[in-house]
Image (spheres, helix red, strand yellow):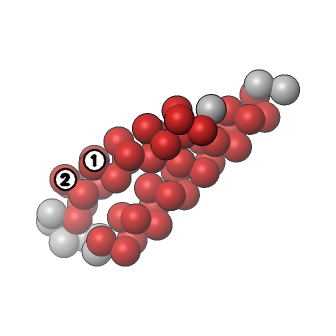
Amino acid sequence: MVIAAGIIGNITDSLLGATLERKSYLNNDMVNFLNTLVASLFGMMFYYLSK
């Protein structure tokens, strides 16, 4: 679960960095915040669905 959430967060970071950060819609701090948020939400989702 942790590895899957980390991979999803990493992919989110790459996608946001390549699209929104490059076009200056988001800065690096916001991209880092969003990828951590997405990874934690998926981690919680995996945890509660596995119960």
Amino acid type, mark 2:
Ala
In the figure, is residue 8 to the left or right of 45? Answer: left
State whether residue 16 is above or below residue 26.
above
On residue 18, the disc is 2
State whether residue 28 is above or below residue 41.
below
Q: Secondary structure at mark 1?
A: helix
- Indicate the quadrant containing the C terminus: top left, top right, bottom left or bottom right: top right
Q: How many marks?
A: 2
Residue most extreme to the left: 23
The residue tagged 1 is 15
Instruction: Residue at 62%, 48% (x, y): give it.
Output: 41
Picture coordinates of residue 19, whole percent (x, y): 20, 54
Instruction: Residue at 60%, 51% (x, y): give it.
Output: 40
Q: Residues within 10 Å of mark 1 (few under 14, many from 20)?
A: some
Picture coordinates of residue 50, whole percent (x, y): 77, 25
State whether residue 42 is above or below residue 30.
above
- Indicate the quadrant containing the N terminus: top left, top right, bottom left or bottom right: top right
Instruction: Residue at 30%, 71% (x, y): give it.
Output: 28
Locate residue 32: give its quadrant: bottom left
Picture coordinates of residue 13, whole percent (x, y): 34, 52
Q: Are marks 1 and 2 in contact (CB under 8 Å)?
A: yes
Distance, label 1 to label 2, CA atoms, is: 5 Å
Q: Nearer the viewer, residue 2 or 50?
A: 2
On residue 3, the disc is none
Amino acid type, mark 1:
Leu
Q: Residues within 10 Å of mark 2 (few under 14, many from 20)?
A: few
